[in-house]
Image (tube, rainbow, N blue to C red):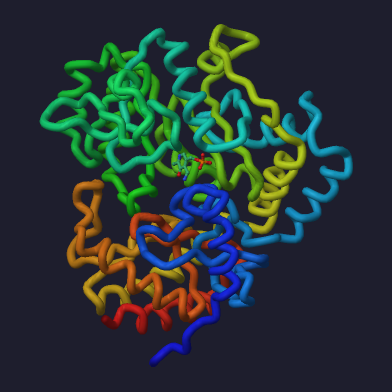
Amino acid sequence: MKQEPVETARSLELYERACAVLPGGVSSPVRAYRSVGGAPRVIDRARGAHVTDVDGNELLDFVGSWGPLVLGHAHPAILAAVGLASERGTTFGAPTPFEIELAERVVSMHPALESVRFVSSGTEAVMSAVRTARGFTGRDLILKFAGCYHGHADHLLVSAGSGLATFGVPSSAGVPEGFAEQTAVLPLDDIDALESFFAERGDELACAVIEPVPANNGLLLQRPELLSRLRDLCTHHGALLLFDEVITGFRLGPGGYSELCGLTPDLATFGKVIGGGLPVGAFGGRREVMSVLSPDGPVYQAGTLSGNPVAMAAGIATLDQLDRAGGWDDLSALGEALEVRLGPVLERHGACLVRIGSIFWMSLAEGAPPRSAEAIAPEAVERYTPVFHALLDRGVALAPSAYEVGFLSTAHTTEHLDLFAAHLEEALVP
Ligand code: PMP
């Protein structure tokens, strides 16, 4: 079916203005559509499962602001909580009942947490957790995995060096080589590489950081053995294990992926869902480890807006809703409903759906889903661009990059998923 051209004049006009004053016209690079081409839609408003752009086009949204909006856009309970909290004042730079309540909540929910500190983004959470691990262990070296993203702190913008050496090299200009050298990088899905690394350098390691469900380079679901072996090796060598649950935390269940996989990391980081759509991150772990933080201990970490009462109130309201309304079960059921609909469509077109709970990714290549960044076929990435645009023209918004996952929210219905499947069937026809 031929699509009518979509009116985007106002988006284009605004984006042109944006480019004059914002680098790339955006506040975060992927929003600029560089990997899929074209100009981004400028969003005017959103509600439930839909966003509306400034030209009035309504889009069925699977981006969900990249993960936080587990209840959908502008959920009434969140708006009410934000309204009530902000009437009391938007920031005090002092303890508030909101942050204490949210801290108690998350400590009671997540198996890794005895003590937690709030920050304002996922980047800050991981950066601070790594400093905590270094302060606790007195070691500098950290280990990460290729294909996992942990925000844009200097020592985490690092990719694998060449050859067998595991020393990292900067993956961004502006990151000093000296910083990158303190970060070793291993491939995912490679237990032999893990064993050799720990045999050689395990005793120097402050922490190993991993997305237990890698969801920033496709959705690279790991074999359970990798995580359990990593847990054992860290314990054996006195290194801390840090699970970056910025995406999975409070989305896959009340205890995140840690609870699902039955492994307890020493430290865990959060963002997205924990702030209910406002800027919140958090890191935490065993009390003994967290006690190295200032003012109790020697590791400095701080934030003017950390524990912001309005953002804390949004986080509390989100967890409340998920808890009271059986939200986590609904999200899993929606995930299954999506798989039932999209799976066969993708398979008919030589592709497959990768999914865990309410997080999904379309692997646009034949064969088993990739388990490492290196296993993603370049053709699959190329194939994404026309599919993305065909869906957008039909009113379905996926992330503007082949490597990004999609998110379901409790605002999605099975009718929305039917519509998605029908449009995808058309979009996949070359
Ligand atoms: N860790 C993970 C696993 C993430 O997915 C992200 C963001 N996508 C971050 C850290 C960084 O979070 P933020 O963008 O809030 O700084």
Q: Which residue lies furthest to the right in this view?
A: 88
* Percent position of residue 274, x then y: 61, 42
Instruction: Count the numbered circles shown.
Output: 0
Q: Quadrant of residue 139?
A: top left
Judge whether 89 appears above or below 139 on screen.
below
On the image, the x and y values in percent for residue 351 come to 25, 69
* Residue 330 visible to the viewer: no
Q: In which quarter of the image is residue 142?
A: top left
Residue 320 appears in the figure: yes
Check the image and name the residue furthest to the left: 163
360, 298: nearer the viewer: 298
Query: In the figure, is residue 407 to the left or right of 350?
Result: right
Residue 172 higher or lower than 63, as above or below: above
Q: In which quarter of the image is the C terminus?
A: bottom left
Q: Residue at x 66, y 46 (%)?
A: 278
* 397 w.r.t. 421: above or below: above
Residue at the bottom extreme of this rendering: 1
Q: Where is residue 78 in the image (x, y as percent from the top left)?
A: 73, 53
| Residue at the image position 26 percent from the left and 30 percent from the top | 185
Determine the residue positioned at 61% across, 31% down.
119
- In this rendering, position of residue 260 left or right of residue 234: right
Q: Looking at this view, is 328 or 19 the one in front?
A: 19
Instruction: Between residue 364 and residue 35, name the one nearer to us.
Output: 35
Q: Where is residue 74 in the image (x, y as percent from the top left)?
A: 70, 60
Occupied quadrant, residue 412: bottom right
- The residue shown at (19%, 51%) is 375
**Quarter holding the N terminus?**
bottom left
